Amino acid sequence: PLMEALNHRRSSRSFVGKEFSPQMLSNLLWAAFGYNRADKRTAPSALNKQSIEIYVATPHGIYLYAPKQNELQLKVKGDYRKQTGIQPFVGTAYMELIYISKTIPVNTEMLYADCGFIAQNVYLFCASEKLGTVVRGSVPKEELVKILGLSNKNQILLCQTVGYNKN
């Protein structure tokens, strides 16, 4: 129930690298920003621009979440989880979510608001499934841009660590 999830919502910084089942991963990404109606998503988006993409860094590679198909598309092979942040716990959880804008918007405040909605959906999903998560703004953006081969139209906004809690 929502009230229970809100009660258990918290930030975590102590993880184990236990892998998610495909169904858990699918459910988490759908909850984050999947399609729940023909042209609408689980998180609101200013002017319905839907300009945020979610990249998922796991021990196997970095994937782009394709919400229409509710699947992951491999972008880069290898374990780049540690390159998504500077804190000591980064890379210890099963995955790191990377929130990226598809275009440089006129109103960046709304872009960050949209990103916050998505991150909160992840927080609530994690609370409901007894997973840990924390949003991070300390991100080596230039390094990630190179790893992902992003264009100058893209902007890395935030990252979010997601995994099983250590304790």
Image (cartoon, grey):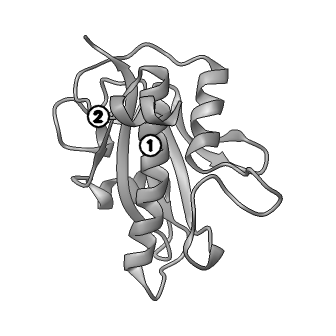
* Residue drawn at x 59%, y 28% as measured from the top left: 25
Across and down, in percent, residue 47 comes to 61, 79
Residue type marked 1: Leu
Q: CA distance from mark 1 to mark 2?
A: 17 Å
* Residue drawn at x 44%, y 76% as measured from the top left: 110
Tell which of 48 and 84 is nearer to you. Answer: 48
Residue type marked 2: Arg
Across and down, in percent, residue 132 comes to 35, 27
Q: Which mark is residue 166?
A: none
Is label 1 or label 2 in front? Answer: 2
Q: What is the secondary structure assignment of the residue under circle 2? A: loop
In the picture, measured across the screen, residue 41 lies left or right of residue 144, that is right
Numbered circles on residues, count: 2
Q: What is the secondary structure assignment of the residue under circle 1? A: strand
Residue that protrudes farthest toward the right in the picture:
38
* Residue drawn at x 60%, y 41% as measured from the top left: 31
Tell which of 84 and 124 is nearer to you. Answer: 124
Neighbor class of circle 2 (other Cα within 10 Å; few <14, some 14-19, many 20+) is: some
**Which of the 4 quarters of the picture holds residue 87?**
top left
In the picture, measured across the screen, residue 164 lies left or right of residue 128, that is left
User: Residue at label 2?
Assistant: 10
User: Residue at label 1?
Assistant: 97
Residue 160 appearing in the image: yes
The numbered mark, 1 or 2, whose residue comes first in the sequence reads 2
Tag 1 and tag 2, C-beta contact below 8 Å: no
* Residue drawn at x 49%, y 16% as measured from the top left: 19
